Image: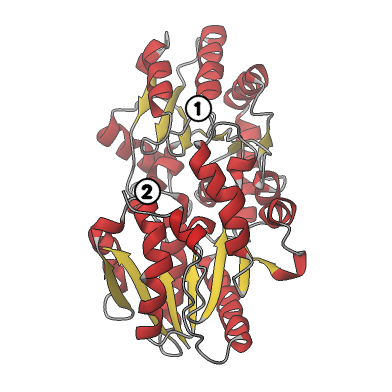
Amino acid sequence: MRIGLSTSAIGRGQTGIAQYVFGLTRALMERTSEHQFTLFVMEEDLPLFQFVGDEMELVTVPESFRSPIRNILWHQKWLPRLAQRHRLDVLHVPTYRRLLWPRPCALVATVHDLAPFHIPKKYDWKRMFYGRVIARHLIRRQNEVIAISQNTARDITTFYGLPPERLTVIHNGVDHSQFFPAPREQAQAEVRARYGIRQPFFLYVARLEHPGKNHVRLIEAFNRFKAETRSPWQLVLVGSNWHGADVIHNMLRQSPFASDLFCLGFVEGSALPTLYRAAGVFCYPSLYEGFGLPPVEAMACGCPVLCSPRGALGEVVDGAAIIVDPENVTAIKEEMTRLTSKEVLREELRAAGLVRAQHFNWQSTAAATLSIYTRAFTQVRHVQPVPALSAALEDTMVTK
């Protein structure tokens, strides 16, 4: 098969969708002797795909199409033509925000989460209108729809009315060649040298997004933990700035324990496993996740996890983490206290997490995804002409 993958919504490599695209692409590279792959990549993102080498074709998307509105327009008007030009059998768009209306070939979509439907004020009204109204129609145009968790599949059925039989759940994977346990002492020494973090620490890896990622409550719980216990433990936040990041930064500055709070920004993937291995506890109090890859990465590195059950998180960690209500600051503080004082509990969580993490790998994800490509292709044996966009749809995507 000739398979295309749109990568233009990866947010310069700093989002969960980016990790999905990178992990899936690396695993699919093992199948290049059987299939031809074409990746559509934003011009400035090309260095992020150097690992592909000559195994896959890279088609450059001009930077003028990076903004959300122009990127949507590119998907609707230019990508279908490129799919025809490259004689694609299947085109995979890994986000519901960029789904195609035209059908130049078999279409496959991945939906990661519908978190904006659950978290008030996560996005402005324009994005919400697109997600609730336009995406609802676009998703029905896809031949196959992949949900990355059972929870996301239920949300798609609930909010978009898509029948369960039209959905396939394929969990995300973990790169076990990168995320694996290693001596903590060595990792801690590297963290001291690189970041100046010298005490035991809680770690949270998530983009700085307020309110969805719930940093403010975690910081408040940490402040209470420090005030009550006088513990030397510190809190380390890793992630790039996103919507509402200024609220989080203000909270960090105002903390009476600001010297024990570290905000490292986006950390390259090669350095991330070291932070997981060095951390005493990984905290993930997110208000909603369609999957939640960081807790699994932490478990794969042997780090005990304190986690919210919201969205798919309970499904993913499945008893291998301490579960806490993410809106209960007192409960978060109490679990932080319990985990810092009970080494035996942390060891139990490390062992359980290592076992759970083995359930997720990108090779299995890629194999299941390839079966979806095949199924979609069998539905559409012949390339269809590209229909014109409806005037109403095109009006919503005019360039600015």
Residue at screen point 67% across, 39% down: 310
Percent x, y of residue 232: 45, 17
Return the residue at label 1. 215
- Could you tell whether 155 is left or right of 119 in the image? right
Q: Which mark is residue 339?
A: none
Residue 253 point in image, percent of width and height: 36, 14
CB contact under 8 Å: marks 2 and 1:
no
The amino acid type, in three-letter code, at marker 1 is His
Tag count: 2
Q: CA distance from mark 2 to mark 1?
A: 18 Å
Query: What element does badge 1 sit on?
Result: helix
Please determine whether, in this image, residue 399 is positioned above or below residue 207.
below
Q: Kindly identify the residue that appears in the image at 55 percent across and 31 percent down.
A: 121
When the figure is inspected, residue 173 is found, relative to residue 215, above or below; the finding is below
- In the structure shown, which secondary structural element does the residue marked by tag 2 occupy? loop
**Residue type pointed to by label 2:** Gln
Of residues 301 and 6, the one nearer the viewer is 6
Rendered residue at 36%/42% (across/down): 186
Q: In screen coordinates, is 62 left or right of 172?
A: left
Residue 184: x and y in percent read 43, 41
Q: Is residue 391 above or below residue 272?
A: below
The residue where tag 2 is placed is: 14
Mark 1 Cα-neighbour bin, 10 Å: few <14, some 14–19, many ≥20: many
Side of 180 where 113 appears, left or right: right
Query: Can residue 115 be seen in this snapshot?
Result: yes
Q: Is residue 65 left or right of residue 234?
A: left
Above-or-below relation of 331 to 361: above
Residue furthest to the front: 391
Can you see residue 360?
no
